[in-house]
């Protein structure tokens, strides 16, 4: 098949007629599918239903350190739950803090603390500065960008490469501008591209010169254990270790949660950082709460016991997710490959497939899908301020629908990608 841009006008017009016919047939079916968010599906929850039974009226409410989980105490979490996250994040006991149900709220709160108080000892609170900027690898997680935007932090997009953010740009911006205070990172199976940062990227982030002495790497390891293929697990270097080696362990805060391991919204969230930063965070958090939900921590620790328990569970979860990713990728290969109208990545894990359509076509594709009953994440959502400079990126979230629903939705998506491309070529080509 020739690429679409090599087609003559009559060929394009014939293709347009055929695609419109297929599109109308879909629209007439009255579909109603929502693929807008990366939510787990109910069968994933069924895999962990035993977690609801490990803590009950008959079981001991005491944590391994003797603290009664029904009462106040253990501000930074119960030891057995801390042990789980220590293993997951590769940190030691005094470097991890277990919070409530959401890592996103910990990140929101951490940025808030940096603005109001400064997190590093002796750092100026950002609210006293005329301008604060953040580096935002894009496409990235829309809710990260929403946090920085809502706090009035100026976002600077940085292009993603197959190895992580474009480090030449990151280094240049971080070294040259004191108001650049940090960077958002999803180092493993990034949202939405599923890219894992290379060792070199992690090392460069750890050792780069920064004009701001309180530069912070927001290391959101949301997909730390979310491998799709047990024989192809991406590995990401431990950034805290790398920062220790370069003499600036206070440069990073790590985040993770069990939202997409157990229950989304009822999991356990945690952060990890250097003992210095931890001292300051503990002081600030002790004013905000007397403690988080230890019963839920107990549930998680008793159910999984250790990292092996988590990994065995995640491998079962991957069995449910693999056919969904395959349905999307097969359709892309069948309908879009070789036509010069779309590119995508085949990630080893995570929750998304990122599709780049022809420049200037993403909004149109999302609108066409919506008009035919399939809701996708709004075009541009994965970019700071919702602005995709090339209007080409679409985030596909395959986890929530059934394989049957997904197959239908992706068939429609592929028709829309082709239709939008043909419309653009017909508009732009001069014959
Ligand atoms: N971080 C990333 C990169 C995510 O993709 C998500 C959810 O989609 C979250 C954080 C949200 O995590 P939590 O439920 O722990 O707040």
Image (spheres, grey):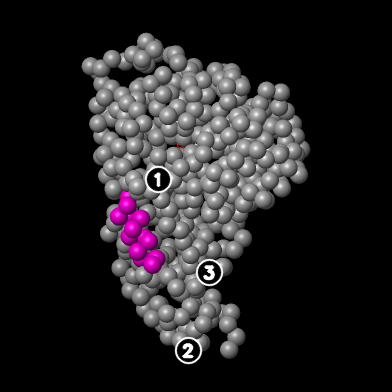
Rendered residue at 45%/27% (across/down):
86
Rendered residue at 26%/39% (across/down):
47
Instruction: Estimate how packed mark 2 is, as few (under 14), some (14 to 19) or many (20 or more) residues with alpha carbons within 10 Å.
Output: few
State whether residue 271 appears in this view.
Answer: yes
The Cα–Cα distance between marks 2 and 1, rounded to whole angstroms, is: 48 Å
Say which of 288 and 12 sits in front. Answer: 12
Q: Is residue 301 above or below residue 177?
A: above
Q: Is residue 174 above or below residue 331?
A: above
Circle 3 residue: 358
Circle 2 residue: 10
Q: For this view, does 372 lie left or right of residue 237?
A: left
Secondary structure of the residue carrying numbered label 2: helix
Give the magenta range: 321-333
Circle 1 residue: 233
Give percent across and percent down for residue 206.
62, 37
Instruction: Estimate how packed mark 1 is, as few (under 14), some (14 to 19) or many (20 or more) residues with alpha carbons within 10 Å.
Output: few
Rendered residue at 60%/85% (across/down):
430
């Amino acid at each position: 098949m020739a690429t679409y841009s090599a087609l003559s006008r009559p060929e394009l017009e014939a293709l347009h007629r055929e695609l419109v016919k297929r599109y109308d047939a879909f629209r007439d079916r009255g579909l109603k599918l929502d693929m807008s968010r990366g939510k787990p599906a109910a069968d994933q929850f069924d895999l962990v239903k035993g977690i609801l039974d490990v803590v009950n009226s008959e079981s001991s409410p005491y944590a391994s350190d003797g603290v009664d989980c029904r009462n106040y105490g253990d501000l930074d979490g119960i030891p057995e739950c801390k042990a789980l996250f220590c293993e997951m994040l590769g940190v030691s006991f005094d470097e991890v803090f277990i919070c409530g149900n959401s890592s996103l709220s910990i990140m929101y709160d951490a940025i808030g603390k940096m603005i109001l108080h400064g997190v590093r000892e002796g750092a100026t609170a950002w609210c006293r500065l005329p301008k604060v900027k953040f580096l935002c690898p894009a496409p990235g997680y829309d809710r990260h960008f929403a946090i920085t935007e809502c706090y009035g932090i100026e976002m600077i997009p940085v292009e993603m490469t197959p190895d992580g953010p474009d480090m030449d740009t990151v280094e240049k911006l971080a070294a040259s501008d004191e108001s650049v205070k940090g960077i958002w990172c999803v180092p493993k199976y990034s949202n939405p591209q599923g890219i894992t940062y290379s060792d070199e990227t992690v090392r460069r982030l750890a050792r780069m010169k920064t004009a701001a002495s309180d530069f912070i790497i927001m290391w959101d390891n949301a997909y730390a254990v979310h491998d799709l293929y047990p024989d192809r697990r991406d590995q990401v270097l431990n950034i805290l270790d790398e920062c220790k080696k370069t003499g600036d362990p206070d440069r990073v805060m790590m985040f993770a949660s069990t939202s997409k391991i157990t229950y989304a919204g009822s999991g356990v969230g945690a952060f990890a950082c250097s003992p210095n930063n931890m001292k300051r965070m503990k002081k600030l958090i002790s004013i905000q709460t007397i403690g988080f939900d230890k019963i839920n921590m107990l549930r998680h620790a008793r159910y999984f016991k250790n990292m092996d328990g988590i990994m065995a569970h995640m491998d079962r979860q991957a069995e449910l997710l693999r056919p969904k990713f395959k349905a999307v990728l097969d359709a892309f290969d069948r309908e879009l490959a070789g036509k010069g109208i779309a590119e995508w990545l085949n990630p080893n894990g995570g929750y998304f497939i990122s599709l780049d359509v022809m420049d200037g076509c993403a909004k149109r594709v999302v609108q066409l899908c919506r008009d035919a009953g399939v809701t996708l994440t709004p075009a541009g959502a994965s970019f700071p301020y919702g602005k995709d400079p090339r209007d080409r990126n679409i985030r596909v979230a395959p986890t929530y629908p059934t394989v049957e629903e997904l197959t239908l939705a992706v068939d429609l998506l592929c028709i829309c990608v082709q239709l939008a491309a043909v419309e653009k070529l017909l508009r732009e080509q001069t014959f």
